[in-house]
Amino acid sequence: MDKFTTLTGIAAPMPLVNIDTDMIIPKQFLKTIKRSGLGVNLFDEMRYDREGNELPDFVLNQPAYRDAQILVAGDNFGCGSSREHAPWALLDFGIRAVISTSFADIFFNNCFKNGILPIVLPQEAVDVLMEDARKGANARMVVDLENQTVSSSDGQSFHFDIDPFRKHCLLNGLDDIGLTMEKAPAIDTFEQRMAQARPWI
């Protein structure tokens, strides 16, 4: 998993509330167990018409937001079913941070496991950042995980809370496998000791 330290990038405004995981990645794309390749189908039913042509009004189809790395979203982002493909699709598109007033619990947890930072801020702060995101590609936000701040393109800064353990994992690029591998020397020592004490196992 890639480390998350400081992210400076384009933020796309998505003011819709209750964006669920089926909107993020529709069910017909859940056949794969690979984390790559899902970005093209991110928000598929909002991005394309029935013939597969891009809908020009959708924010991520607009030239200013094609390289967005941050989403500023409405309340209750990631609700619905618990599919982990949702953060996979966001990450494969290039999204590393999502800002909202609230997230569905399972989606929130899955983001951290996949290197995406979900940031919870008060409505007043989200409103400011949403308006900043509407400025387009020339307005770049800064997400500083170490200092736990989000700064708008004009320098307004907002502090966010994060669990210290999750912060440590993101800063160091540690998913569940990475956390286990940190304990590899202790695991090796234990296995050697058990092999000597119980050779029949």
Image: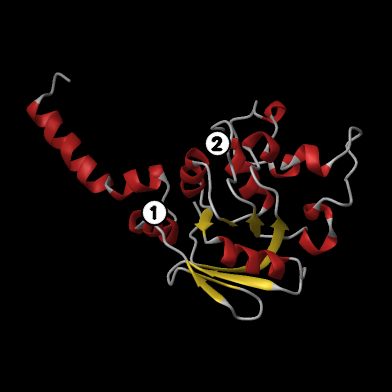
Please state which of residues 105 and 87 is positioned toward the viewer in this rendering. 105
Q: Is residue 110 left or right of residue 129?
A: left
* Most distant residue in the front direction: 124
Q: Which mark is residue 166?
A: 1
50 up-or-down from 199: above or below: below
Pick whichever of labels 1 and 2 is earlier in the sequence.
2
Q: Residue at x 71, y 60 (%)?
A: 12
Residue 15 position in % (x across, y down): 70, 54
Element at badge 2? loop
Hey, which quadrant is residue 137 in on the image? bottom right
Q: Which mark is residue 84?
A: 2
* Most distant residue in the top direction: 200
Neighbours of disc 2 within 10 Å: few (<14), some (14-19), many (20+): many
Q: Residue at x 48, y 59 (%)?
A: 3
Q: Are marks 1 and 2 in contact (CB under 8 Å)?
A: no
Neighbours of disc 1 within 10 Å: few (<14), some (14-19), many (20+): some
Q: What's the residue type where badge 2 is placed?
A: Glu
Hey, which quadrant is residue 147 in on the image? bottom left
* Most distant residue in the left direction: 197
Q: What's the residue type where badge 1 is placed?
A: Arg
Please state which of residues 77 and 181 is positioned toward the viewer in this rendering. 77
Q: Is residue 92 left or right of residue 54?
A: left
Residue 30 position in % (x across, y down): 65, 29
Residue 53 position in % (x across, y down): 90, 41
Element at badge 1? helix
Residue 90 position in % (x across, y down): 64, 47
Distance (Cα) linking label 1 and label 2: 17 Å
* Most distant residue in the bottom direction: 155
